[in-house]
Amino acid sequence: MPAYSGMIDLSSVGSSAQVNGAIFLQISPSIPAGSGTWNSFLKLQAKTTTNEMGYNTNGSVPNSDKNKGLKEGKAIQVGNIPILIYGGVAYREFCLDVSQNNSGFLSLDQLKFHLANTGNKVGYPNSELGPAIFDLSVTGNWIKMKDRNPGNGRADLAVLIPSSLFGSDNAKYVYLFSELGANCNADNGYEEWGIGTGGTLIPEPATLAILGLGAAVIATRRKK
């Protein structure tokens, strides 16, 4: 897959991209709608602006972060995130549910992952988290998405982060920070980050690149 810098358009059905070692897929999961139907750990919703940002934690979130759009979050550990095998490579699978009106478009402007020994860190940036193990926007990248799967709890984007970046300690806590709506404004309900279900995706990347099957393969997987 090509290298990217700037806007990456994943708003069309079946679109996909590899960015800084991670794989991003537009998806259409065959699950019922509803926030309670999947394992979400972070909800973001724009309040006084058209963008929203926040991070997951078990800590008591300050109002300054709530005002930026952090609606709800909870801590997750490395061991909570299923491993997905894709092209012979192990990834940790995360999913994003987009909830938009009007054009339906929304931008993912920042996405960073950090590790920590405890799950109650608050404030971002936070020096206690250390450097990000993954950073989408380090080369100016941002992703254009579209709300193609109506209803909360039905993901629109799968994000596969190399499992090697998380190390071997399953007890470490994973902090996801994201900003949405800076380039394509947030105009509706809340967005949700959740974890995937793991397994093995079929077909693998070489076939996917030829056929453009990002939307289909996410639901076609072998369980371990």
Image (spheres, rainbow, N blue to C red):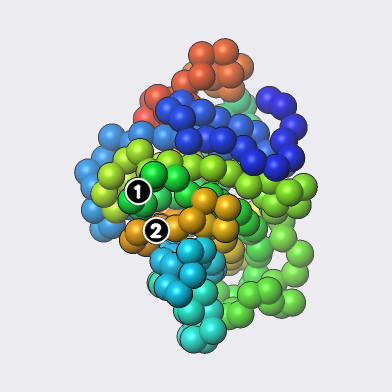
Along the line of sight, the residue nearer the viewer: 7 or 82: 7
Q: Is residue 202 left or right of residue 176?
A: left
**In the rendered image, which residue does mark 2 sit on?**
187
Residue ID at (56%, 35%): 9
Q: Residues within 10 Å of mark 2 (few under 14, many from 20)?
A: many
Q: Amino acid at mark 1?
A: Asn
Along the line of sight, the residue nearer the viewer: 199 or 180: 180
Q: Amino acid at mark 2?
A: Asp
Q: Residue furthest front?
A: 102
Is 159 above or below relative to 88? below
Name the secondary structure under disc 2.
Answer: loop
Residue 186 in percent (x, y) is at 44, 58
Q: Please indicate, yes or no, whether residue 37 appears anywhere in the rendered image.
A: no
Residue ID at (26%, 49%): 151
**In the rendered image, which residue does mark 1 sit on?**
102
| Numbered label attached to residue 76 | none
